[in-house]
Image: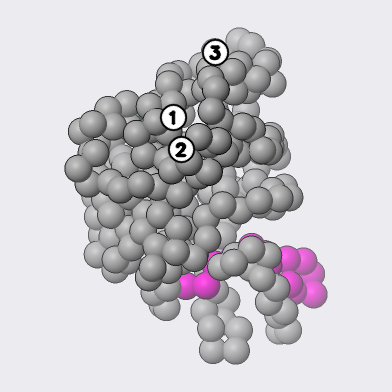
Amino acid sequence: MRVEVQERFPGVYWLRFQEGRKLATRSAVPGQRVYGEEIVEVGGVEYRVWDPYRSKLASALHLGLREMPVRPGSRVLYLGAASGTTASHLSDVVGEEGRIWCVEVSYRPMRDLLRLCESRRNLIPILADARDPPSYRFLVGEADVIYQDVAQPDQAEILRRNLAAFLRPGGWALFFVKAKSIDVTRDSREIFGEEREKLGEGVEVVEQRILHPYERDHALLLLRKSF
Ligand SMILES: C[S@@+](CC[C@H](N)C(=O)[O-])C[C@H]1O[C@@H](n2cnc3c(N)ncnc32)[C@H](O)[C@@H]1O
């Protein structure tokens, strides 16, 4: 089977097969499968296929996201890390020089996340509520990127607090908005616009992607902090 590897963003690749293409990251822990993902070896290098149905950032990348703020060496604050499906790919991308503070409020996914963090030293697990940045202030430094995927009705307020506490000026936020967490009866597009308004001044929306057909009623707002 012939596979061509094309770097789409630093650390993020398209694997091109005769019958199509797959998004992937270069595995930092060869031989490790985190969520049953496909592993493809090309020229002695192991790539983990990044499933757009399991990770919202992968779906946004499949849908043509133009900027990818998480890069080798990035310091990322991840709110709603769950068991680490997406965080594991970001761990591949940021590499040894980067780090990802993974905040998760539920014990159950945290158990799996802890196991993952043992094999990936750039992932730092934090059992905490993302509504309360002061409770993890002592563990987290200044972030280049905030990734938020918490599916809560007050998701904009959660992000606003963390932007103020941790994001450096000029830093990025990947804000995954779940419309149905706010109001199940209204049109999703209206809600995405309102969430954007709630963030207030000091952040600019660089890109917006509705994640259909990979996710229902979700959008990504890619934001940049201006000051
Ligand atoms: C959709 S899942 C995240 C999936 C993950 N982003 C991924 O792609 O691998 C949402 C997670 O947010 C967590 N969560 C919800 N509210 C939270 C809060 N206030 N603080 C921290 N985590 C929260 C949930 O427990 C859940 O694990």
Q: Dot 1 surroundings within 10 Å: few (below 14), some, or many (20 or more)? A: many
Identify the residue under disc 3. 183
Magenta stretch bounds = 14-27
Crowd class of label 3 (few under 14; some 14 to 19; many from 20; radius 10 Å): few
Question: Magenta segment, principal secondary structure?
Answer: strand
Asked if residue 31 lies in the magenta stretch, the reply is no
Residue at the front extreme, as displayed: 227
Q: Which numbered disc flags the more N-terminal residue, 3 or 2? A: 2
Amino acid carrying label 3: it is Asp
| Depth check, front residue: 151 or 77 | 77
Q: Is residue 227 above or below residue 8?
A: above
Q: Position of residue 160 (x, y in %)?
A: 44, 26
The residue under label 2 is 148
User: Are discs 1 and 2 less than 8 Å apart at CB?
Assistant: yes
From mark 3 to mark 2, how far is it between C-alphas? Answer: 19 Å
Q: Secondary structure at mark 1?
A: helix
Q: Secondary structure at mark 2?
A: strand
Residue 20 in magenta?
yes
Residue 12, picture quadrant: bottom right
Residue matched to label 1 = 159
